[in-house]
Amino acid sequence: MTAPQIYKGLDGVYADHTAISEVNAKEAVLTYRGYRIDELAAQRTFMETAYLIWHGELPTAKQLAEFDAFERENRTLSFALTSLLRSMPSSAHPMDRLRTAISFMGTEDLGANDHSPEGLLERAYLMFAKLPTMVATIYRHDKRLPLIEPNPRLDYIDNFFHLTLGRKPDAVTRRAFDVSMILYAEHSFNASTFAARVVISTLSDIYSAVTAAIGALRGPLHGGANEAVMGTLQDAIDAGGVGKYLRGVFARKEKVIGFGHRVYKNGDSRVPTMTDWFHQVARAAGREDLITLHTELADAIAKQKNLFPNLDYPAGPTYALMGFPESIFTPMFVMSRITGWTAHIIEQLADNRIIRPLSAYNGAPLRKLKK
């Protein structure tokens, strides 16, 4: 019998079709529903992009207004959910608390098992609207700050800054954040998206699938990387410069967080856009020194290891300059990726087959128990 071919990490395996996004690694191009993400980031908003990911087409003015109104009206958390978030220990990672909050949200929803496209989409909208409030509640509880109520007079971006930092962002910060949400929104069959599709393929509920996705995103090899980038830059400073830092890292055979990607081998298609906005935010903050360090490190790793930055590398310092703590960088990733996850959940159920791969056994041979 011929031994089965094993693809560790499912590397190179096509598990299904998707009409949501395409990652063209060779050309370093990412598209959402056929539109290049660099063009979407330049010409559209995150709200418009979220609608596109769910519906397949960009919204009309009327459709966008209706979506915007729904989001504004559904930001508030239940008293029970707010109490739960405030009762969890601050020692727990914000992603752990966010995962629990989404799971609890499912227990409050009597229609959680509604698998109709309309029911799934409504719950996707609800999580989209409430996630910023969840993230802000976690942040302000940790900082021992009074909670701030959502303001329906503010749009999605301004309201999130209001909820967390108690202020509206300046124009450059606002647009940079909006662009980051567009770039993080969807990325084909990545680990967290695939986890969501596996769970929903069993005909579980949408909240369970999203909870699983958050668990996958929590890992440092996936979404958790954006938290570590500022630490990497600080380590380079503490080591006395990029050269000394990298010599130590490579001697210890350590990875530099924020570099390399399973799919992109010659550069992440999202990086140029995010890097441009990082530079704009840094210049507005008078932190040209951070731009210099950031560029020097990327150039050195490209030259020495032929590795290139992924989206987390410019996004991490951008969020830090905006005033957000590293602890909520990945939860903010969730605020964006909820669009892609739920679009894939809906797509999976439209033509479902339970995802159940095989495994090749390599353990002990068949044996008998001794009497």
Image: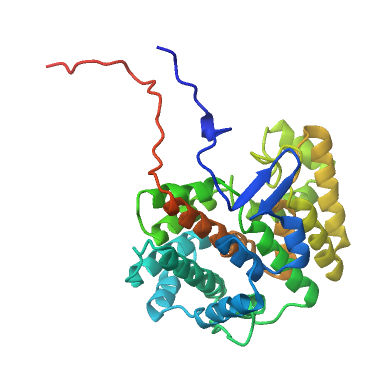
44 displayed left or right of 282 = left
Against 369, is 285 above or below?
below
Residue that lies at the very extreme toward the bottom in this rendered image: 153
Decide if residue 240 is in sight here.
Answer: no
Give the left or right position of residue 293, taking residue 178 as reference.
Answer: right
* Total number of numbered discs in the rendering: 0
- Nearest the viewer among 172 and 98 is 172
Looking at this view, name the residue that lies furthest to the left.
371
> Whole-percent x and y of residue 138?
52, 70
Considering only vertical position in the picture, is 2 above or below 151? above
Q: Is residue 184 above or below residue 44?
A: above
Q: Position of residue 241 (x, y in %)?
A: 84, 46
Q: Quadrant of the C terminus?
A: top left
- Where on the picture, by quarter, is residue 290? bottom right
Foreground residue among 77 and 230:
77
Q: Residue at x 50, y 70 (%)?
A: 125
Question: Colour mode?
Answer: rainbow
Q: Position of residue 13 (x, y in %)?
A: 54, 33
Find the residue positioned furthest to the top. Answer: 1
Query: Could you say where residue 319 lies in the image, as x and y percent from the top left?
Result: 70, 64
Q: Nearer the viewer, residue 143 or 327?
A: 327
* In the rendered image, the vertical position of residue 254 relative to residue 113, given as above or below: above
Quadrant of image for the N terminus: top left
Q: Taking 35 as reference, is 223 left or right?
A: left
Relative side of 346 to 246, left or right: left
Residue lying at 76% horizontally and 41% vertically, measured from the top left:
27
Residue 175 is at least partly visible in this image: yes
